[in-house]
Image: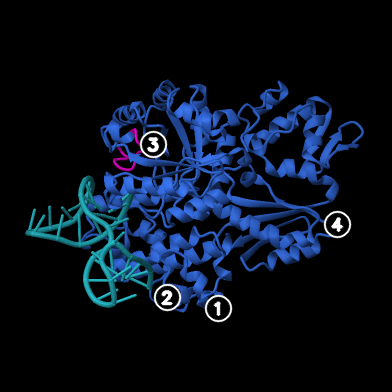
Chain colours: A blue, B cyan
Amino acid sequence: MGRPNDEVAELFQEFADLLSITGEAAYKVRAYEKAARAIGGYSEDVSKLDLKGLRKIPNVGEAIAKKILDYQETGTIRQLEAVRAKIPAGVRALTAIPTLGPKKALVLYEELGISSVDELAEAIPAGRLEGLKGFGAKTEDNILHGIELMRRAGDRVLVDVAMGVAEEIIEALSPLAGRCEYAGSLRRCRETIGDVDILATADEPGPLMAAFVELPLVAEVIARGEKKTSIRTVKGLQVDLRVVPAESWGAALQYFTGSKAHNIRTREIAVRAGLKLSEYGLFEVESGDLVVSATEEEVYERLGLPWVAPALREDGGEVDAAIKGELPRLVQLGDLRGDLHSHTDLTDGTASLEDMVAAAAAHGWEYFAITDHAPNLFMQRMTDEKMLAQREAVHALGERYPDLTLLHGTELNIDPDGEVDWPREFLSGFDVCVASVHSQFTQDREVMTRRIVRAVETPGVHVLGHPTARLIGRRAPVDADWDEVFAACARHRTVVEIDAFPDRLDLPADLIRRALRHGVKFSIDSDAHATGHFANLRYGVGTAQRGWLTPDDVVNTWPLKRLLAYLRGE
DNA sequence: GCCGTTTTCGGCCCGACTGTTTTCAGTCG
């Protein structure tokens, strides 16, 4: 698991995108996309597999396996390099604009020579697209709106991307450092990350800084000094490395973890106590003497506070709660006893039922739900027969795993009126039903609220899946009266999901805190479409922590018996 | 390019929505 798989998946995704721009047959493009997803979600490290091992990956055949071998030897894929030479990277970037796909991107490039988002953003108001076939006034508006949406996400990256960079750097630098960890918004588990902060201790920072700027992922050195060095990675992400003496570790970690607002609150407390808090330690103002600095726990303790979990450090009431001794005992990854939302290759997952269950068992979970898509997501071609056959297979497979209880479920589609796929009798055959919005995302607030409320009130619906349906940086959350939705969930004991996929993290933390006030319960689910996706649960847990959730708030930390009783409304 | 209870060739996620059109192409989920 880890970086090489992500890198290879990214290469094949790029290859697929470029082929679709050049007009390659759709089935071929899809074959590469499917392989990319399967590789990204595969549990074993593709950089260490031979031809035979590679071919065991779903959707990887002879040709793609050989391209991976090429990557192992050369660090790239020759066929990809060839097509890169024909289509500039900026043309592919155009297809990231919502409503602008490969066909339009190619027209813009071939007819007008446009090969970057910035160029396009200038060309439209300048009237350069006028008369271009297929580009009317409405299309221009949609493109400008799409560019605006992308720019609002700014230069921030998804948390898993930042985490991958941070872990790679920490692994490389740790042998040269006393301690080396990530701080900043990444440590606070924010959903997107603007820059990565790495903190290290060393008596002599020189070798550490030298090694840092020599890392293969470094594209540019922005600043280089004794205590701090900043670089930009090949993907444009800024990383700051700060080196402090070992005795300053705790104060520095506290300082660089932030947030700024939280630090202001803690420094105010220090000032009132005649102390001064900086990244070098907590000092007596009068004498200038160092009080403490070695660990975060000591710093907080000397301020009269218990240690505050990084996910809470947003000046969202955590300081007052700490003073009163009312901080929640936050849910941890290790508290999870199972997962209530996953897919197999019966619908859009890339791993077989057997492989998904084996991976779930390897996690040591007590229970695991398989919840493939229901028929109304037409592209997945689900039928009653296929679903019932899967149920038989699940039951049969359960015999092989005496310590793991398999639950057979489904992910239902909430249609525009709030109805779900199957009648009540059929739903009653499932152990767990997740219901989610997968279409018609732009209904107005009143209609959307009624729609979701109706779904969560439906008998046999247990979990409201990825409630806002947002895709971070790509699709806005749906508009609903969330207080009304959460009140309905509490009334009907419908669990509210925190989908752990890094581009969803849905429900978001601010809405989690609102839902909590209504007394709803939550599930932290992987929504795994491949065995490797269980690793995303860490981000779901981080989001739950930012929402102040305790294990008691999260149903999949409960023993199976309690969970099932809750789902059944007992 | 991948895959097989349609099995080594011939299929491959299928329907809705939108905008630009005069009957459909492109995009999305």
> In the image, A444: left or right of A330?
left
Residue A258 in the image, given as x and y percentages of width and height:
67, 40
- Say above or below: A108 vs A361: below
Q: Secondary structure at mark 3?
A: strand
Residue drawn at x 41%, y 52% as measured from the top left: A344
Q: Which residue does the numbered mark 4 point to in the structure image?
A: A203
Indicate which label's residue lies in the foreground, 3 or 4. 3
Residue designated by label 2: A62
Q: Alpha-carbon distance for marks 1 and 3?
A: 47 Å
C-alpha span from label 2 to label 1: 18 Å
> Which tag is nearer the camera, tag 1 or tag 3?
3
Callout 4: SS: loop
Answer whether residue A266 is visible to the viewer in this image: yes
Disc 4 crowd rating (10 Å Cα; few below 14, some 14-19, many 20+) is few
Q: In which quarter of the view is residue A50 placed? A: bottom right
Query: CB atoms at circles 1 and 3 under 8 Å apart?
Result: no
What's the residue at 71%, 51% (across, down)?
A181
The range drawn in magenta is: A428-443
Near-viewer residue (A121 or A192): A192
Kindly report the distance in space between the C-alpha atoms of the residues bearing marks 3 and 2. 38 Å
Disc 1: CA contacts within 10 A as few (<14), some (14-19) or many (>=20): few
Quarter placement of the N terminus of chain A:
bottom right
**Which residue position holds label 3?**
A433
Q: Nearer the viewer, mark 1 or mark 4?
A: 1
> Are callouts 4 and 2 both on one chain?
yes
The answer to which of marks 3 and 4 sits earlier in the sequence is 4
